[in-house]
Each structure stands twice: as structure tokens, then as C-alpha cells.
Amino acid sequence: MVRGKAESFRIHPDKIAICGFSAGGHLCGSLAVHFDAEELIPEGDYTKKQ
């Protein structure tokens, strides 16, 4: 979603970082390790550029 809206957010789509603490840190770490998991492939509204 963030990459899809990069132009309207005025950011570089290939320079996105994530950060979290405690449970958020766990989610960030999980995303970094399991980024290519089949369950995480965007579907529906998340694939549309808005």
C-alpha cells in the first residue's frame, strides 16, 4: 500500500523502512524474515493504487 501511494506521499518506493518496539518490533522482524510468505501476498484493496 505504501509503495503504491509513494508518489502521493512524496517518498521513494524503494527506500521504505519499518521500526517497532516490543510487539511492533516482533512484527517488523517477522516481516523482514517472512516477507515472501505466500500468506502475505497482498490481495483485494491492498493491491490497488489509490
Image: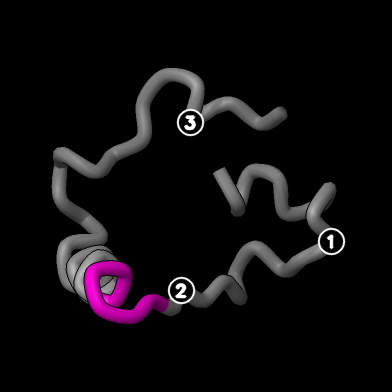
Using the numbered discs, state the Cα–Cα distance from disc 2 to disc 3 in whole angstroms: 18 Å
Q: Earlier in the sequence, mark 1 or mark 2?
A: 1
Q: Earlier in the sequence, mark 1 or mark 3?
A: 1
Residue at 33% x, 80% y is: 21
Q: Earlier in the sequence, mark 2 or mark 3?
A: 2
Q: Which quadrant is the N terminus positioned in? A: top right
Asked if the stretch drawn in magenta spans residue 10, the answer is no
Task: Give coordinates of residue 33: x percent, y percent.
Answer: 17, 72
Using the numbered discs, state the Cα–Cα distance from disc 1 to disc 2 in whole angstroms: 17 Å
Query: Left or right of 11: which side holds 18?
Result: left
Could you tell me the amino acid type at mark 1?
Arg
SS state under label 2: loop
Q: Is residue 48 above or below residue 40?
A: above
Query: Left or right of 22: which side holds 46?
Result: right
Residue at 76% x, 66% y is: 11
Residue at 16% x, 39% y is: 39
Residue placed under numbered mark 1 in the picture: 10
SS state under label 3: helix
Residue placed under numbered mark 3 in the picture: 46
Which callout, 2 or 3, points to the residue nearer the camera? 2
Please give the range of residues in magenta: 20-25
Residue placed under numbered mark 2 in the picture: 18
